[in-house]
Image (spheres, helix red, strand yellow):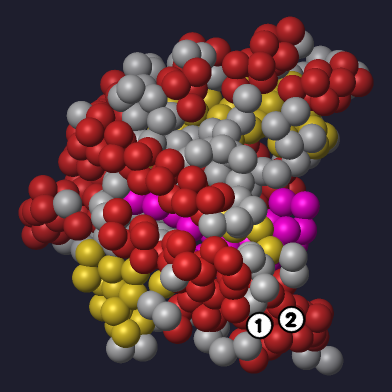
């Protein structure tokens, strides 16, 4: 028997997706022209599905710093920081992250996925109890699989259900750890963080917030939802990534917890993974400075987010409830979403196709992520394409064609 036989059902589903035209999970860009434009199959394409919220992938200073570090330190570290030591850039980034968040400690990971995987799985022991939002990212669910701690899910963004679930947990002498996100990646909705903080305090639980999609986006200084809600001091561990607003790759955790540095010799995804190349770390150091001073960038980003969100609603589409850089169109079926996605790409618009079971409530989504670098002209063109195809597919009413066509 083939060792891959267990994936026959997945293979059938994947083939079904590819038969509709392009392969949405293996799109290859011929060229990236800017944070908002690329070339796909020889066609100039608007990029509206990249999570490049502040457009910093092409920031000149970040690139120059990365090139300088590349020349000084070479292409890679060839091992973990535990085995091969740290470069000066690693220490500088951790110091800058701690300062940025006004925390005592910071820890840098090779990916954002590993940050969640490592911190959550390491913190939760056999006598502890993990309580996570039902719509948590896959990396949070994967972390739960690695820990011996029991896991309870609470209804998405529902503090009352969280209170009910916490009230049912029997204390075995361990700790309760609540995990939520700032902006949720699929629908772009925000956690009711003030209320969640109140509930966790009531039960003496620790709180972890993944700010992957809200760092650089929310808060006066770009520290995320906790800053925007004024509850930073009530969040025990903030997790995040360098692959969204900071335009690179990597992840981090910041905290004021005493003896935090013990995690560096206890967290296996940190201990046994090669560390980030200094060129990447150097670019993140520079990008973090841009985020800290980037109030105008955030204002432009949220202006674009409000514009796209309102335009999509006005066109008659069903989108996520909150205004954020993630604007997701909800469709009736996977077949409709696949066909719609192909039509958009063929017209020169790239967005993300998200299908069950990777989506909340088994929704079929076309997920857009807007950038501060998008122009109003690009957003208008994107909405026009959505509307044209939406009318052709019977998703919205044809009388809107005159307005958006």
In the image, residue 30 above or below residue 89: below
Spatial distance from mark 1 to mark 2, Cα to Cα? Answer: 6 Å
Horizontal arrangement in the rendering, residue 352 relative to residue 302 (left or right): right
Label 2: state its secondary structure: helix
Magenta stretch, residue numbers: 350-371
Q: Is 368 included in the stretch rendered in magenta?
A: yes
- Whole-percent x, y for residue 337 in the image: 65, 71
- Rendered image: mark on residue 13: 2
238, 15: nearer the viewer = 15
Instruction: Give the residue at mark 1.
Output: 17
319, 86: nearer the viewer = 319
The residue lying at 54 percent from left, 19 percent from top is 235
- Whole-percent x, y for residue 255 in the image: 46, 22
Report whether residue 270 is seen.
Answer: no
Number of numbered markers: 2
The residue lying at 54 percent from left, 57 percent from top is 315
Q: Is 275 included in the stretch rendered in magenta?
A: no
Horizontal arrangement in the rendering, residue 142 relative to residue 161 (left or right): left
Contact (Cβ within 8 Å) of mark 1 with mark 2: yes
The N terminus: image quadrant: bottom right
Task: Report which quarter residue 192 is drawn in.
Answer: top right
Q: Residues within 10 Å of mark 1 (few under 14, many from 20)?
A: some
In the image, residue 207 above or below residue 203: below
Horizontal arrangement in the rendering, residue 27 relative to residue 165 (left or right): left
Label 1: state its secondary structure: helix
Toward the top, the furthest residue is 202
The C terminus: image quadrant: bottom left
Horizontal arrangement in the rendering, residue 290 relative to residue 144 (left or right): left
The residue lying at 22 percent from left, 33 percent from top is 296
């Amino acid at each position: 028997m083939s060792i891959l036989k267990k994936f026959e059902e997945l293979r059938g589903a994947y083939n079904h997706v590819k038969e509709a035209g392009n392969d949405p999970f293996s799109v290859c860009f011929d060229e990236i022209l800017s944070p908002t434009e690329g070339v796909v199959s020889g066609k100039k394409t608007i990029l509206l599905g990249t999570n490049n919220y502040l457009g910093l992938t092409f920031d000149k200073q970040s690139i120059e710093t990365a090139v300088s570090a590349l020349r000084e330190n070479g292409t890679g570290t060839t091992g973990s920081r535990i085995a091969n030591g740290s470069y000066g850039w690693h220490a500088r980034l951790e110091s800058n992250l701690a300062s940025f968040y006004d925390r005592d400690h910071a820890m840098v990971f090779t990916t954002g996925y590993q940050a969640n995987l490592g911190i959550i799985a390491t913190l939760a022991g056999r006598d502890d109890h993990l309580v996570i939002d039902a719509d948590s990212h896959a990396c949070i669910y994967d972390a739960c699989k690695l820990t011996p701690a029991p896991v309870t899910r609470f209804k998405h963004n529902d503090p009352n259900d969280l209170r009910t679930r916490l009230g049912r947990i029997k204390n075995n002498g361990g700790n309760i750890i609540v995990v939520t996100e700032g902006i949720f990646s699929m629908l772009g909705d925000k956690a009711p963080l003030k209320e969640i903080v109140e509930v966790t305090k009531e039960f003496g639980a620790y709180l972890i917030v993944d700010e992957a999609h809200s760092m650089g986006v929310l808060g006066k200084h770009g520290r995320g939802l906790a800053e925007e809600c004024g509850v930073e001091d009530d969040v025990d561990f903030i997790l995040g990534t360098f692959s969204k607003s900071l335009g690179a790759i990597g992840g981090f955790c910041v905290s004021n917890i005493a003896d935090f540095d013990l995690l560096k010799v206890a967290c296996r995804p940190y201990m046994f993974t090669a560390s980030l190349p200094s060129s990447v770390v150097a670019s993140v150091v520079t990008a973090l400075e841009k985020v800290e001073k980037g109030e105008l960038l955030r204002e432009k980003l949220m202006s674009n987010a409000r514009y796209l969100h309102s335009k999509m609603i006005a066109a008659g589409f069903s989108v996520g409830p909150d205004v954020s850089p993630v604007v997701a169109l909800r469709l009736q079926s996977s077949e409709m979403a696949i066909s719609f996605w192909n039509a958009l790409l063929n017209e020169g618009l790239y967005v993300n196709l998200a299908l069950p079971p990777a989506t909340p409530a088994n929704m079929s989504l076309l997920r857009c992520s807007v950038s501060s670098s998008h122009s109003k002209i690009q957003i208008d063109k994107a909405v026009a394409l959505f509307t044209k195809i939406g009318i052709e597919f019977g998703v919205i009413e044809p009388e809107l064609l005159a307005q958006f066509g």
